[in-house]
């Protein structure tokens, strides 16, 4: 248990404070940078900050869910999804830097709350755990769609990152459903959407 606690603590520190790494090339890396006005650049950097904070939440959720999951197939899927979310973390972090923005100052808060939710989801059993994963990915996919609509049309670099992330999230949801995810009750889905709105509105500014 001590070894596992050390591993999980190390993962937390790496997620919050170390530069994220990506095995896959960053989407849009070969697309020339387009000049954006100051207002548009700040807007896109803020959107990417929101997405980066969302990936911080995803890392914590998957960490908590994996720690409390019982089935090995579920643990493996959570680990695989977490690896891809780490790449999303790297892509959004890089794009924030390119735009001259900064990451959310509240990332440790988002991480702690999401880790607690992940641990709770895992305690409810593997099918509910997978249901939580599937619903999270559905909501993130919808959130990314809204950000794609809010991007300046000429910002192809950011667009390619968000489109790749959206495709990955949809795949994670499909796999969770294939593994037997339960559909979450409507009030729980609504509460998740409300919490997500609070996080996105706050991270856009702070």
Image (tube, rainbow, N blue to C red):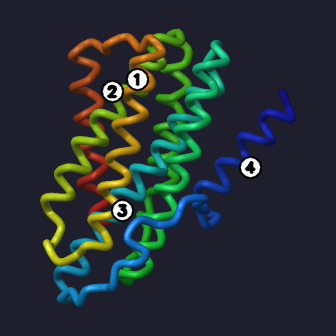
| Number of residues whose C-alpha sits closer than 10 Å to that of mark 4, classed few (under 14), some (14–19) or many (20 or more) | few
Q: Which residue is mark 1?
A: 132
Mark 3 or mark 2, earlier in chain: 2
Secondary structure under tag 1 reads helix
Pick the front one: 28 or 60: 28
Q: CA distance from mark 2 to mark 1?
A: 5 Å
Q: Give the answer, above or below, for where 150 lies relative to 137.
A: below
Secondary structure under tag 4 reads helix
In contact (CB < 8 Å): disc 3 and disc 1: no
Q: Which of the 4 quarters of the picture holds residue 182? A: top left
| Number of residues whose C-alpha sits closer than 10 Å to that of mark 3, classed few (under 14), some (14–19) or many (20 or more) | many
Q: Position of residue 11 (x, y in %)?
A: 68, 48
In contact (CB < 8 Å): disc 2 and disc 1: yes
Residue at x 50%, y 35% (from the top left corner): 61
In contact (CB < 8 Å): disc 4 and disc 3: no
Q: Which residue is mark 2?
A: 135
Quadrant where the image shows the C terminus: bottom left
Tag of residue 185 = none
Q: Which residue is mark 4?
A: 10
Q: CA distance from mark 4 to mark 3?
A: 27 Å
Q: Which residue is mark 3?
A: 161
Residue at x 21%, y 86% (from the top left corner): 36
């Amino acid at each position: 248990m001590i070894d596992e606690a050390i591993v999980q603590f190390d993962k937390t520190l790496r997620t919050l404070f170390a530069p994220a790494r990506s095995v896959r090339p960053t989407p849009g890396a070969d697309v020339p940078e387009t000049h954006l006005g100051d207002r548009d650049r700040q807007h896109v950097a803020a959107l990417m900050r929101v997405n980066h904070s969302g990936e911080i939440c995803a890392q914590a959720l998957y960490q908590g869910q994996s720690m409390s999951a019982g089935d090995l197939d579920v643990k493996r899927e959570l680990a695989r999804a977490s690896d891809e979310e780490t790449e999303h973390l790297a892509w959004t972090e890089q794009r924030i830097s390119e735009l001259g923005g900064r990451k959310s100052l509240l990332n440790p808060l988002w991480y702690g709350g999401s880790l607690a939710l992940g641990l709770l989801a895992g305690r409810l059993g593997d099918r509910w755990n997978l249901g939580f994963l599937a619903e999270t990915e559905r909501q993130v996919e919808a959130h990314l769609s809204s950000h794609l609509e809010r991007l300046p049309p000429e910002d192809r670099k950011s667009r390619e990152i968000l489109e790749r992330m959206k495709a990955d999230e949809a795949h994670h949801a499909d796999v969770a459903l294939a593994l037997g995810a339960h559909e979450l009750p409507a009030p729980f889905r609504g509460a998740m959407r409300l919490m997500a709105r609070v996080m996105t509105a706050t991270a856009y500014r702070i």
